[in-house]
Amino acid sequence: MASSAQLVKELRDRTGAGVMDCKEALEAARGNLESAFEYLRKKGLAQAAKRAHREAKEGVVAAYIHPLGAKLGVLVEVNCETDFVAKTDAFQALAKDLLMQIAAANPAYVAREDVPPAVVEREREVYRAQLADQKKPPQIIDKIVEGKLEKFFGEQCLLEQPFVKDASGKTRVRDLVDGVNAKTGERVVVKRFARFLVGEAG
């Protein structure tokens, strides 16, 4: 059994949380490292929700150009509250991960809230048309349509996409942003992005 000091160190290395927070989490979890990790994560996300109204006017514009032939490029703006946090390893790593995600998964929007209502309605109509010949009750059709719409958001919205570096598909891009939000103690926002592919219409 690892000593409490070892557990605190391991939890700090994984989460970046303070010593006292790690001790509190381990006490609450009765020495179980995974439970303590979840405790800190939930606490961090709860604190992040409280920061949602704060302004995030600092940050970076990060760039990526594909090394083979320079035919694919990505720009992303990620905001935080202070210049200090913008320079941290966690924030810089998030910006790089977002660039890779946008390059690989080609989202159309940052978040589901950014999808114009007309686009959402058009998608709904398409799904309903696909199901028109099925003899199912209206409430079942509605459920299927909403399920297809969730899939659409998961493919087209950056924050909803499965993170490309996680083979299990369990991590969403939103989880990465929330993690940095919790680790830095500041509001972190993906503001906008642009993806350029040579020969592709604007």
Image: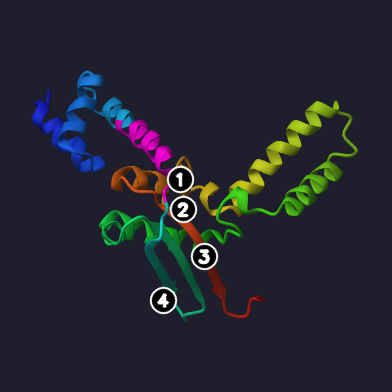
Residue 7 placement (x, y as % from top left): 15, 31
Q: Residue at x 37, y 56 (%)?
A: 80
The residue where tag 3 is placed is 193
- The secondary structure making up most of the magenta span is helix
| Range of residues picked out in magenta | 40-54
Category of crowding for the residue at label 3, using alpha-carbon neighbours closer than 10 angstroms: few (below 14), some (14–19), many (at least 20):
many
Residue 132 placement (x, y as % from top left): 89, 39
Separation (CA) of disc 2 from disc 3: 17 Å
Residue 61 placement (x, y as % from top left): 41, 68
Category of crowding for the residue at label 1, using alpha-carbon neighbours closer than 10 angstroms: few (below 14), some (14–19), many (at least 20):
few
Separation (CA) of disc 4 from disc 2: 19 Å
In this image, 30 relative to 185: left or right?
Answer: left
Mark toward the start of the polypeptide (2 vs 3): 2
Q: Nearest the camera: 187 or 127?
A: 187
Amino acid beneath label 1? His
**Image quarter in which the N terminus is found:** top left
Q: Residue furthest front?
A: 54
Mark toward the start of the polypeptide (3 vs 4): 4
Amino acid beneath label 4? Pro
In this image, 68 relative to 135: left or right?
Answer: left
Q: Residue at x 48, y 43 (%)?
A: 169
The residue where tag 2 is placed is 164
The residue where tag 4 is placed is 67
